[in-house]
Structures are given as structure tokens and as C-alpha cells.
């Protein structure tokens, strides 16, 4: 028996997540992006493509496109908001913290995560973790491919 209380659906679909799903920020594709990353979740069919423009090692523009559930699309929207203006190193650290938050329901998110903390309840729904991390995996894959 788990020592965690039963998750509430309203915890999963917090208002901020629903707002980003209904009104996605940075939705679309950039023309001539410096980084393109793609993610696909074979379990549910969600897919995301992330486009990023870099200048002096910092993300100046970020966009995402794709289709899927409210969790994956809201995560793409919130991620593109969170990474703008950050250095690649800061983004790697932020992605690491996000991934850790998805694996550990007791993880205390650092202040730098800001609104991304809204996804903390998703860690209690293992099936949805891949949806929440899809955009982050796509971004990391795109950044890694660019640096190789």
C-alpha cells in the first residue's frame, strides 16, 4: 500500500495546465530554427516538435507544435515560456530538475522552476509522466544533436 494519498484529478489538471492547453503559448514552428527536436510517445500517440533559435548560447525564441493530451501540450507551452532567455547550461539544469520532479512525488522544486511546479502532481500518475516530459526530451535531443 502506498504511503501517498490518493491523487485527485484536480491536482493533475491544475488550472494553469488547463490554461496552457486551451491557450498554448509559442505554438507553431519557427522559420530557420537553430535547433529542432522531435518527441513521440508510442503509448498514447502524443507527438511534439520543438523549434529553438539561439544567440550567444541563449535561447531567444522557442516554439512547439504537435498533438496530444492536455498534459503534453501544456508542458510544451510552459516549457517554451520557461526556456526563453536562458543559457543552454541553465536549460539542461532546468530539464534535469523537471525530470526529477516527474520521478519523485516528494521532490521539492527549486524556485527557478516557477510555474512548471504545476506539473508536480503528475508524478503520481506514472502513465502521464511520459506525456509531461515529451517536450523536454525533444528539446534535449535537439540540443544534443546540435552539439554533436
Image (cartoon, rainbow, N blue to C red):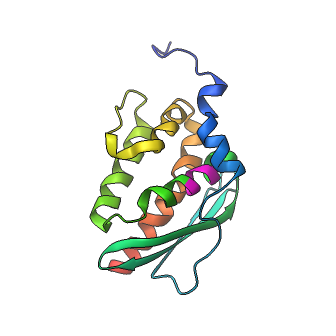
Q: Give the left or right position of residue 114, taking residue 65 as reference.
A: left
Q: Is residue 116 above or below residue 56?
A: above
Q: Is residue 97 above or below residue 31?
A: above
What residue sits 49% from the left and 58% below the top? 81
What residue sits 56% from the left and 68% below the top? 63
Q: Position of residue 62 (x, y in %)?
A: 50, 69
Camera-side residue: 53 or 69?
53
Count of numbered tags? 0
- Residue that protrudes farthest toward the bottom in the picture: 32
Q: Quadrant of residue 88?
A: bottom left
What residue sits 40% from the left and 33% below the top? 104
Q: Position of residue 85 (x, y in %)?
A: 37, 66
Q: Position of residue 103 (x, y in %)?
A: 42, 38
Q: Is residue 67 above or below residue 1?
A: below
Q: Position of residue 47 (x, y in %)?
A: 65, 61
What residue sits 30% from the left and 66% below the top? 87
For the C terminus, the image quarter is: bottom left
What residue range appears in magenta? 73-77
Q: Is residue 145 above or below residue 135?
A: below
| Secondary structure character of the magenta stretch overall | helix
Instruction: Tell whether position 108 is magenta.
Output: no
Amino acid at each position: 500500500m502506498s504511503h501517498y494519498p490518493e491523487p485527485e484529478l484536480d491536482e493533475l489538471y491544475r488550472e494553469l495546465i488547463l490554461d496552457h492547453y486551451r491557450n498554448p503559448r509559442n505554438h507553431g514552428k519557427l522559420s530557420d530554427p537553430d535547433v529542432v527536436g522531435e518527441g513521440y510517445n508510442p503509448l498514447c500517440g502524443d507527438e511534439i516538435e520543438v523549434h529553438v533559435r539561439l544567440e550567444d548560447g541563449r535561447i531567444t525564441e522557442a516554439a512547439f507544435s504537435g498533438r496530444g493530451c492536455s498534459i503534453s501540450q501544456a508542458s510544451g507551452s510552459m516549457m517554451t515560456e520557461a526556456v526563453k532567455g536562458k543559457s543552454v547550461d541553465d536549460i539542461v539544469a532546468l530539464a534535469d530538475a523537471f525530470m526529477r520532479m516527474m520521478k519523485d512525488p516528494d521532490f521539492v522544486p527549486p524556485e527557478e522552476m516557477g510555474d512548471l511546479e504545476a506539473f508536480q502532481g503528475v508524478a503520481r500518475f506514472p502513465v502521464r509522466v511520459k506525456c509531461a516530459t515529451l517536450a523536454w526530451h525533444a528539446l534535449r535531443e535537439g540540443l544534443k544533436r546540435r552539439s554533436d
